[in-house]
Amino acid sequence: MALISYLTTVRLDAGARKHLAEDLRAAGIARPLMVTDRGVRAVGLLDQVLKEGGIDPDIPIFDETPSNPTEEAAEQALALYRDGKCDGLIALGGGSAMDLAKAVAVLATHEGPLASFAVVNGGMQKITAQTAPTLAIPTTAGTGSEVGRGAIISFRDGRKLGLLSPYLIPKRAIADPELTLGLPAMLTAATGMDAISHCIECFISPVDNPVAAAIAIDGLERAIVALPRAVSHPHDIDARREMMIAAMEGALAFQKGLGAVHALSHPLGGFRDLKLHHGTLNAILLPPVLRFNESVCSKTYPRLKRAVCLDANADFASFMHEFALSLGIPMRLRDLHVPREILSDVSRLAPRDHTHATNPREASEADYLAILEDAF
């Protein structure tokens, strides 16, 4: 078993879920609120983790996490947290459950509306060490939120904003690839492309952090090999473990910041009626963003090409388009029934997203619109 202490402590191994009770004690959590979703409960993962982790099945459980976590869901989970006299949280699921748990951890220990803690509202300085402790158990290999310092929340006013603070990093994470074995092929592909987009965007970010860059490129090298195997052979435990590592590494590299892919996918995901999957959006947006950034990435693109075994003269953006397409991902926004008329709104919101600042090439509202048209 690999025991990793970097930003936090992670148990990485098949069967790591059996150490849940021990990790709760290490995190100082005696009465947790479990944050999950109906899908995780329906396939039996919730009961399995509680039983094998040695946890009281009567702990408070919030299983109404939406696919894009909302301000309203955070408030509902907060009420359950307070009614249950909880002192910490377990997040079991994909990035949505983990992000929602982080939002609850802030609300439970700080005064003020959730929006006041968003990065764009100066919220990073408002989140303190008083944040309730969280333990994260991913059931997908994509967001890496189990080691991430951020949470993305859809607010009532239609904005999809990020909370960001080192105090949001879960105190412990259990990365058990066995919990991803039942993930359907399309969800495996979409979450895997989310991890790949993290690794690529962090690597090409202009922020100077060689350690994070090395972690990001390692994550890409792992994912480009493992993801097709995990999609075509869902019970390949080695491929699942590699994807769990890649997802984690993508998030460990967040120290360098993301870029235009996320600056666009965040506001697109804020249109609740469309119910757009974040990883799918990232897969679609990645190739046109790579084309946009190429003129300023002469030092980073050659290393990306080597990571995926491409010739020096190959078109990296085209390669990533074909790679995602081969996984079964629809590679046009129109395939997701995104109305063309919202593109101008998205391009207007993108420069306000916290990931916009670390894109390697300065992007204007007009540039963002052109990228969206390219992806449409």
Image: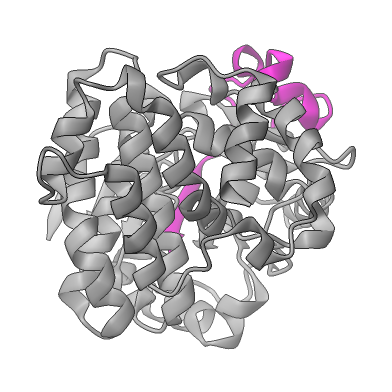
- Asked whether the viewer can see residue 31, the reply is no
Q: Magenta span has 132?
A: yes
Q: Magenta span has 110?
A: yes
Residue 365: x %, y % from top left: 69, 22
Q: Name the quadrant containing residue 234.
A: bottom left
Looking at the image, residue 229 sits to the left or right of residue 67; the answer is left
Residue 58: x %, y % from top left: 63, 75
State how many labels appear. Answer: 0
Given the current orientation, which residue lies at the most extreme right position?
Answer: 157
Residue 253: x %, y % from top left: 31, 32
Q: Name the quadrant containing residue 171.
A: top left
In magenta, the rendered stretch is: 109-138
Q: Is residue 191 above or below residue 265?
A: below
In-front residue for pair 102/309: 309
Q: Residue at x 88, y 42 (%)?
A: 156
Q: Is residue 48 above or below residue 93?
A: below
Q: Residue at x 47, y 33 (%)?
A: 149
Q: Residue at x 71, y 31 (%)?
A: 347
In-front residue for pair 237/257: 257
Q: Name the quadrant containing residue 348.
A: top right
Q: Is residue 346 above or below residue 213?
A: below
In-front residue for pair 339/44: 339
- Asked whether the viewer can see residue 167, the reply is yes
Q: Residue at x 71, y 24 (%)?
A: 117
Looking at the image, residue 247 sits to the left or right of residue 369; the answer is left
Residue 241: x %, y % from top left: 22, 66
